[in-house]
Structures are given as structure tokens and as C-alpha cells.
Image (cartoon, helix red, strand yellow):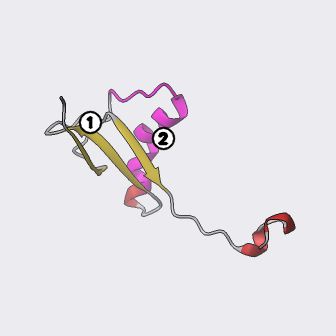
């Protein structure tokens, strides 16, 4: 059984071979994720095999605020 580690994306992670089958997600990780993290626009976390740097999977959290006045009348509580 392989052990995995979850950690915040860093410059030490190898994203060069990452491919999940969805081109837009692959492109986000390789072209945008690190810059967005440095700018505090989002946080990306990655899974690697324990002790390895190659990224196997990732998720990104993007903080968002929804103001009630921006919702349609149907969605107001």
C-alpha cells in the first residue's frame, strides 16, 4: 500500500507530469496556481506519494463572497 501526503502547493512540488484528463485543470495547475497562491487569491493543496514531489492530484480553494443584493429575487431568503 502506498502512503500519500497532502500539503499546500510549493515551489518544491513537481507539476511537470500532472495530467488529470481535463485540459483546463491541467493548465490551471501548471500556469496559474502558484501565481494565484502567491497573490493570496486562492490556496492549492496537492497529494503526492509520501516523500515524493510529483503531484498526483490537487484541489484549489478560492474564497468568494456572495452579496444578497447580487442574487436574483428567487434566491433571496
Q: Is residue 75 above or below residue 55?
A: below
Q: Is residue 17 above or below residue 70?
A: above
Residue 14, disc: 1
Whether 33 is among the magenta residues is yes
Measuring from the top left, give residue 44's x and y in whole percent: 39, 51
**Quick one: which residue is furthest to the front in this view?**
1
Q: Is residue 69 above or below residue 34?
A: below
Left or right of 72 on screen, residue 59: left
Locate residue 13: give its quadrant. Answer: top left
Q: Closer to the camera, 74 or 11?
A: 74
- Check whether the beta carbons of the residues at disc 2 and disc 1 lie within 8 A of each other: no
Q: Which residue is mark 2?
A: 28
**SS category of the residue bearing label 2:** helix
Quadrant of the drawing holding the C terminus: bottom right
Tell me which segment is drawn in magenta.
17-36
**SS category of the residue bearing label 1:** loop
Whether 27 is among the magenta residues is yes
**Quick one: which residue is furthest to the right in this view?**
73
Q: Residue at x 51, y 63 (%)?
A: 63
Measuring from the top left, give residue 36's x and y in whole percent: 44, 55
Q: Residue at x 57, y 64 (%)?
A: 64
Locate residue 16: give its quadrant. Answer: top left
Quadrant of the drawing holding the N terminus: top left
Q: Main secondary structure of the magenta part?
A: helix
Q: Closer to the camera, 22 or 15?
A: 22
N-terminal-most mark, 2 or 1: 1
Label 2: how many Cα within 10 Å (few below 14, some 14–19, many 20+): few
Mark 2 vs mark 1, CA separation in Å:
14 Å
Measuring from the top left, give residue 29's x and y in whole percent: 42, 40
Residue 64, disc: none
Measuring from the top left, give residue 28's x and y in whole percent: 48, 40
Label 1: how many Cα within 10 Å (few below 14, some 14–19, many 20+): some
Amino acid at each position: 500500500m502506498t502512503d500519500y501526503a497532502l500539503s499546500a502547493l510549493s515551489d518544491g512540488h513537481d507539476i511537470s507530469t500532472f495530467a488529470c484528463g481535463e485540459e483546463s485543470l491541467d493548465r490551471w495547475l501548471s500556469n496559474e496556481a502558484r501565481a494565484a497562491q502567491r497573490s493570496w487569491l486562492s490556496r492549492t493543496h496537492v497529494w503526492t506519494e509520501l516523500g515524493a514531489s510529483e503531484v498526483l492530484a490537487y484541489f484549489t480553494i478560492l474564497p468568494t463572497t456572495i452579496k444578497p443584493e447580487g442574487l436574483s429575487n428567487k434566491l433571496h431568503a
